[in-house]
Amino acid sequence: MQPPVRPPPPRNFVAVKILEPFAEATINLVMLPDLCGSSLLLALPDDIFSLIARSLSPRDVCSLGLSCRDLHAIVASDKVWLAQCDKLGFVPCNTLVEWRKGVCSYKALCRFLVNIHPLIGIWVHQNPELGNVVYVMPGFLSVVGCRIIPQEVGPLGLEEGPILKSNVLLLEVEPRHQRNVGKLAYSKSFAHDVDKEVSRRLSRSSSGISKSQRLVGQKGTGINFSRLGFGDRRRLLDVVTSQTRLNIPETANSMLFPRVRNDECDSKRDLAVLYERRLLLLQMYKRGNGNHDLKPGSESPLNPTVLGSSEVCKSLDCTSGYHALKAGDAEQANYPKGKTLSGFLKNGLKQILGKSSSTYGNRDFQKKNASSCNSKHVQLHEFLQSVACTGSKGMSRICGFMGRDFWLASRRPSEDKPGKALFFILISYEESEGQQLLIATKILEGTSYVLHPNGSAMFIVNIDQPSTDTFPWGTDEDSNHIDVKQSFMGEGIANGYGFRYPGSKPGSLFIIQNGLLVFIWKESRAVLTLQKLNLADLLRKGERVPSLSPVSNFAYLTKTYSNVFSGFSNSSNALSSPRYASL
Amino acid sequence: MVTTDEKGPLTAKKKSVIIRSCDGDEFLVSESAAVLSTSLKKILEEKEDRLIHLSDIDNKTLAMVIAYLSTHADDGLSDDLKRSFDQEFVSGKEFDVLKYLVLATDTLQVTCLCYTVAKKMADIMKNKLVEWVRREFDIQNDYTPEAEAEIRRLDAWAWDDRQLEDD
């Protein structure tokens, strides 16, 4: 289609003379400098330059700055880098402004955000089976990993009641010298043991190996971290974290990110507390508390093992790996007690590291998981990859009613569990034999023991095939009319052969007008209700609890958390939603 | 200007504005097109001026801006057509031309064109090597090799895996 382009009006318009006399106005807004050569970019006004830079990547902006000193000064402006930070999109603009007060520039902030970007999102470990969901989200100039504890949903529902969580991972940005433009530091808190809470911190040395060198290592003799043996990876992480940890007093960890507040004063107080905590951490870091081996800026071979930097995870070179293993053995001997849990936490960490090297590309894994026919370890690893890929990419392709930032929580009031166990279910899409499938994968189950392994597909529906079943109810508990927008045919999980080989029974998925998804098994009439949620907001409102003490069998916990907010309300909740609870 | 407007020739006169570029060329523009520029709109609201002199904008650039304004003032065109016109409008133009255009749209406050042009300029600069930047914009490298290496090292975090172009 050829767009209609109007010819520009003729010049030296003769009619002008006839129209006179008019008062003449002159616009003299900007003196246009005589632009040529190198001044071409320099001469652009600040606003326009920022406008252009907004569409560039951080790398493009850096390239400009590298061309000459004058341009370097221009691209260093906060305006340019605020736009870059904002473009990354996972920290809202007003938070950025708040964070800026703690670092030397928006460029430093952007560096931090770029580094943590691969970590942000939901992380699921299939082992243990019983809920090991970690949601990594921005804290306060930091990254906080929250483990969402298997629990029941309180009477107030998800929107009102607090959700329980404990923190397993903290990453903090640290501005060191102006020239360093911000430093990534890592701290990890072992919240299971209050007396001996250990926070760990890795810091990127400013004299760390440059990317080009790392790339050489990767192509040449380097070993991909994810290809290291299970035990080796753990030992490597052990030694890295032991080298760089900091002990952080429990009192400093009372708050890790601003809570959701309605009151302006409250949120200001929160921010003050967080600044305080950050200062404490920085001071401790400078003093080198808890770690006398750490020399910032040293050329230790372990320096490239910075968490949060994806290149690092991809390429740990051989020598540092072996170094690590030896030291790792010694290090483990020092912590015999915490071994189980630290091992477990490290496994989680390992998977986080592993994510960076995943390609985000292989979505077939989802299906393999659905059929649950792989060996345990393969499945575990692939499951993680699949979660990573659906979390990052897959959620965008949705039939028009879900954003990728939303996750689904589900209450499953079924006949055997008349309660309100909190389920987290990940919705993903897949194309198989020309059919568009919607797959709901369980990633958290809030029951005292799990019926199906994590990563089981709770249901798979064909979104090309409308269901012939009718929705069993016309009104909800408040007698409001229920308007079913769409329905699809599919199959839901059912008891099959053992724990790992679930069967499936036909059912239908209904999409209701307020965004609820309801899956109903045709025969058993069991109902699975799904609700969209914003996990980051929920966690900000949530209640923090210490981690459970280490146990050897995670599949059948002897100790569990029960949400006290759900404790007294079982009956009332059942009454408040009889429609769903009765099934 | 001939009009079939029933309100007569006086109204017709009111509906057009003359804009004069810095090189003295004059353009007759309908008022509906002129008011798409926030600067021109303000002037037209404040005074009953019919002749506006733009001392900073040359005739080539002004002609382009006016072509854009006239197209967007045309109610007969669908939004899709206008969008494809925008794409066509900036495509194939040299960086230099775009730069004058972006300055002119900034002066005249034609926000949407300013955004489109800035986007196009960014597209040209995307994924380019430093060497390209220097050559294209005729920039003299005034860094010492050590200083350049230092900046490269400090900026290493921003690097991604994309292949950069040199042309």
Image (cartoon, coloured by chain):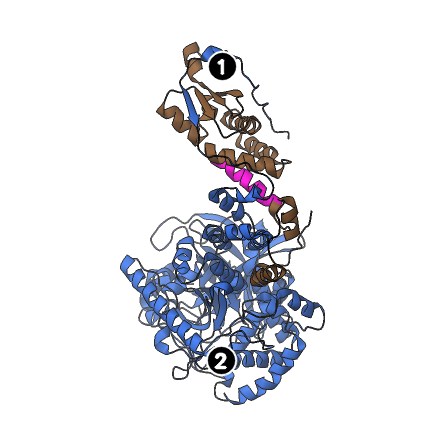
> Residue A16, labelled with which disc?
1
Q: Which chain is brown?
A: B
Q: Residues within 10 Å of mark 2 (few under 14, many from 20)?
A: some
Q: CA distance from mark 2 to mark 1?
A: 90 Å
Q: Return the chain for callout 1.
A: A
* Amino acid type, mark 2: Tyr
The residue segment tinted magenta is B111-124
> Residue A96, labelled with which disc?
none
Q: Which chain is blue?
A: A
Q: Secondary structure at mark 2?
A: loop
- Do marks 2 and 1 both belong to one polypeptide chain? yes
Residue A417 occupies quadrant: bottom left
Residue A391 seen from this side: yes
Q: Residue at x 38, y 20 (%)?
A: B48
Question: Could you tell me how many numbered marks the image carries?
Answer: 2
- Residue tagged by mark 2? A556
